[in-house]
Image: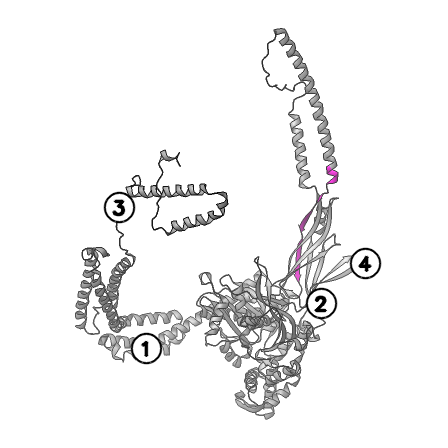
Amino acid sequence: MKLLALLFILLGINYANSLAVLSIDIGTEWMKVGIVSPGVPMEIALNKESKRKTPAVLSFRDDVRSFGEDAQTVGIRFPANAYIYLLDLLGKDINHPLVKLYQKRFPYYNIVEDKERNSILFKHDENTFYSPQELIAQLLHKGKEFAEVNARQPIKEGVITVPGYFNQAERKALLEAAQLADIKVLQLINDYMAVALNYGIFRTKEFNETAQYIMFYDMGATSTTATVVSMQNIKTKERGYVETHPQISIIGVGIDRTLGGLEMQIRLRDHLGKKFNEMKKTPNDVFKNPRAMAKLFKEAGRVKNVLSANTEINAQIEGLLDEKDFKTPVTREEFENMNADVFERVAAPVEQALKSAGLTMDIINYVVLVGAGTRVPKVQEKLQQVVKMDLAKNLNTDEAAAVGAVYKAADLSTGFQVKKFITKDAVLFPVQVAFARETEDATKHVKRMLFGAMNHFPQKKVITFNKHTDDFSINLNYAELDYLPANEIEYLGSHNLSTIDIKGVADALNKNTGENSESKGIKAHFTMDESGILGLANVEFVFEKKVQPEAEEEGAFSKLGSTISKLFSATEDEKPVKEEPEEPAQEASAENKTEEATKTNDTKKEDGKAKDKESKGKDKEKDKDAKEKEKDVKPKLVTVKEPLNAIETTLTYGKLTKEQYKSSTEKLKKLNKIEYEMNRRASTLNNLESYVIDMQTKLSEDEYSEAATAEETKKILDACSEVSDWLYEDGMDADADTYEAKLDNIKSITNDMMTRVFEHKERPEALNALNSMLNSSRHFLDNAKNLTKTSNPEKDVFTDIEIEALEKLILETEEWRDKKIEEQNKLKKYETVKLTVKSLVDHMQALDREMKYLVNKLKIWRPRKPVEEKKDENKTTEEDKTKNEKAEEKVEEEKEEEIKMEPENQEEAPEKILELGEAAEGSDEKVEPTKAKDDDHSEL
């Protein structure tokens, strides 16, 4: 319960808009599925056998597709039809060393080259081929079905774990498989990051600002990784204020891609095969028989697991070859001797992880075991010798990655809110950019590191190319891999990732050539996303241009406006004379007036000419000032970005084309449809068989035999016998529609009997419910009669009509009940039912509606308040007037007392005022304000 409560707190689920999400931890040997759905914080989805993990195996036999344990059973008899350990084949060509190793371990598979995509195909038969992506897509789709069955709703989104050592081609191939499985991948999460996240979410209280260093040692079926992780609390300010969040950072990784339980199992298989050949029970060689080798492989797996807890066990197989049985003892010492060189490799990933992290073992706080391979005692012994500390075994090695991944899925989805947990993964294989640059002497080859080893991602990087004036190409390669062992570098495959052709350089350069333009280089923007996949975001040619500032532009507009105003101005002769203000009137003769008028006009003309000269002079001065300002103001720099066309060609692994994707999708849909029809047929056949046997059994019981007439009983038994005989003779090959038709026919014959059985079985309970409701209604009615206006005027909750209606309904229901019970008691059990459960329910519903109405009315009823007489606001009683007059007199006395105070007594004034205030507060008499009349305004 504590764990469940913790999960609820961590997830803080918002159920209103939530949708279920999943995680799939798909390994080379097992598949685990996690889900988060409304009401269920985090859990592992169960498969059809109600198990928490499913073998990552699928098989095809006679158009029947099987998964998990069913596929393993097929694989024992027909090894080439069951596909196992598929994950390591993603994104590889036919010459890859891991493909060669797979063919050596499982020689019965027919693996051919896919020349179109530089990949491989399994040749199932002459006309059927499957790529590793298609096979893994079917496993992922089955995992999605498990999640949907457990969540009881469709699921589209999720997080998928991926081995941390997967390169770019392998990660892209897994994304294609998820796309074929109709899963929207929110993120590919490295398996060791998922394990660390699962470890951290349950231990956040142990975190502080000081980093803790934990090593996770994970030995799975085919590979081993040692990961150094830093865990601590950090402060962020993403939302405008400081917050503290836990953070997990990957700082060191060591890998061995071929060290795991599979290698031990293969060696044990070969050991058992040699033992059988030495017994010479048959002249045939067991190593040349695929079926016998498949049996030995399965038994080797069982023996390996048992030897982890025991020192000795007998390996035994019935009919191994030519119907000859095989049995031989195997000791733990023998097992350890045949894998001695394997156990010597246990320490190498630890040393590599510490070296890449730049730490020593004394800094590590804990070493946590993960993966089924770490259960082998010799592995723990060798590991403890190198780490020199106790090994932590408190993590669920099978489900840790699935739980961590589903937590990340809930975080990334829009339907859930989880506690923020910052995760910083690291680049395992450094990536560099290589390109050629032409110089005066020769072509110069330049290399620049893009994402170095242990760089955190997601991350963005920009590379600038300064010397290119025409189209050119760049290459993305793996580089600086010296820290890896030689065999790991070989397993990485081709180091050349892709070539990017950049087009349109010359056109962009010509478009932005000029004195005011300067090239700032070609910038290529690269990303390493959350899934660890390298991508090219965009390429652009960047220029800086000199332009005039906005202020100068405004000055130009003002000049233009001035010029326009001049165009509309009058010339010197045409310019109108401005009217002068009138002066006071004076007495003068007509001649004097005329002379004065003439002088005035001449004066005005001279003043106008002088003003025009002055304005022209001012305009020239303004133009000079503007030119001088233009010389002083510096031009503004503007950045111009010209997008370039970048064409990327993948060199390692070809992506699915539209035609290939469509072909693969149709192939998988066809398989899904066949499987659906098979499951539907099996389900309907099982339902028909079960119903026939169930009816034959029930008719021997009194409860059912008494509810049917003799004719009905005979008819049902005859129909069941007919269907039973048909099933075991000709009906085993029928389709689902035929089975459903047969089932519907039998149900129609038995329907009347089953209805009567139901009525007789459920009637007593329904009657008890009705009686209980009638009793409570009658009790309510007795009390309600005292809550009417007639009986209790102060508590008139109900009307007399409502009380009468309830009483009438109760009486009618009781009469109907008694009548129907009497009628039903007279009938035989096989006769038509008079008192049905539905009729009882209908009467209860009618009574319930009436009761709910009255009960709700009682809940909201409130007693009425007595009506108060309103006072006339315009009339004032004699008592109010007397009180007001006394209050006014008291105020006047206080004012006079304050005025009569002498200067030397001013210090006593506050005390006096306080005393008056206390006297006023202590008085029981309240002075109510009166409304002032209009004629009293002057006095106020």
Q: Is residue 341 visible?
A: yes
- Within the image, what quadrant is residue 450 found in? bottom right
How busy is the neighbourhood of tag 3: few (under 14 within 10 Å), some, or many (20 plus)? Answer: few
For numbered disc 4, what is the local secondary structure?
A: loop
Which amino acid, by three-letter code, is at mark 1?
Answer: Asp
For numbered disc 3, what is the local secondary structure?
A: loop
Which disc is residue 694 wearing? 1
Residue drawn where x is 18% and y is 55% of the image: 790
* Residue 443 coordinates in the image, percent (x, y): 79, 59
Which amino acid, by three-letter code, is at mark 3?
Answer: Glu
Which residue is under mark 3? 869
Disc number lying in front (4 or 1): 4
- 635 in magenta: yes
For numbered disc 2, what is the local secondary structure?
A: loop
Q: Find the distance from the CA under tag 3 to the CA under tag 2.
A: 99 Å
* Residue 200 coordinates in the image, percent (x, y): 56, 71
* Quadrant in which the N terminus is drawn: bottom left
- Within the image, what quadrant is residue 899 found in? top left
* Residue 73 vs residue 808, the one in the foreground: 808
Which disc is residue 479 wearing? 2
Residue range in magenta is 629-651
Q: Find the distance from the CA under tag 1 to the CA under tag 2.
A: 71 Å
* Residue 126 vs residue 851, the one in the foreground: 851
Q: Find the distance from the CA under tag 4 to the CA under tag 1.
A: 91 Å
Q: Earlier in the sequence, mark 3 or mark 1?
A: 1
Disc number lying in front (3 or 1): 3
* Residue 747 vs residue 523, the one in the foreground: 523
Disc number lying in front (4 or 3): 3
Q: Earlier in the sequence, mark 2 or mark 4?
A: 4
Q: Earlier in the sequence, mark 4 or mark 3?
A: 4
How busy is the neighbourhood of tag 1: few (under 14 within 10 Å), some, or many (20 plus)? Answer: few
- Within the image, what quadrant is residue 827 found in? bottom left
